[in-house]
């Protein structure tokens, strides 16, 4: 027959392993969200804008424009490119 102290000595390491597993899952989810790219404009529209203004300008314009607003992204990307080139 097993002693109660034997169960107690098994519970602490198992609890630690389970908690570490939860932490790994949470951190991996946060890292995925933090470093993945999100584009509000997809397909040929985005390709056209990237070809015209560059991926950095389009990406920054997407960050300040409403979701899927192509006209806003194009306008902001154009402004960013002009500012970068010093054409203001």
Image: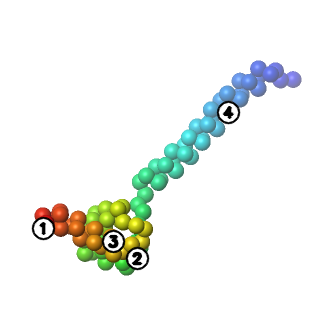
> Disc 2 and disc 4: Cα gap in Å?
48 Å
Q: Quadrant of residue 23?
A: top right
Earlier-in-chain disc, 2 versus 4: 4
Q: Quadrant of residue 59?
A: bottom left
- Determine whether label 1 and label 4 are within 8 Å by CB: no
Earlier-in-chain disc, 4 versus 3: 4
Q: Answer few, some or many: residues within 10 Å of disc 2's Cα (few below 14, many 20 plus, some between 14 and 19).
A: few
Vertical placement of residue 6 versus 76, above or below? above
Instruction: Identify the residue at horizontal 27%, vertical 68% (top origin).
Output: 77
Mark 2, secondary structure of its residue: helix
Give the residue pinned by disc 4. Answer: 14
> Disc 1 and disc 2: Cα gap in Å?
29 Å
Mark 4, secondary structure of its residue: helix
Give the residue pinned by disc 3. Answer: 72
Whether residue 63 sits left or right of residue 80 in the image: it is: right
Question: In x, y percent, where is residue 8?
Answer: 74, 24
Instruction: Identify the residue at horizontal 66%, vertical 33% (top origin).
Output: 15
Instruction: Identify the residue at horizontal 39%, vertical 72% (top origin).
Output: 69
Q: Which mark is residue 43?
A: 2
Position of the C terminus by quadrant: bottom left
């Amino acid at each position: 027959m097993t002693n109660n102290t034997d169960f107690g000595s098994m519970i602490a390491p198992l609890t630690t392993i389970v908690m570490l597993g939860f932490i790994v899952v949470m951190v991996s989810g946060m890292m995925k969200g933090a470093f993945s790219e999100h584009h509000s404009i997809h397909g040929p529209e985005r390709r056209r804008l990237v070809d015209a203004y560059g991926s950095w300008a389009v990406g920054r314009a997407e960050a300040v424009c409403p979701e899927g607003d192509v006209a806003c992204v194009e306008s902001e990307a154009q402004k960013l490119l002009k500012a970068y080139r010093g054409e203001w």
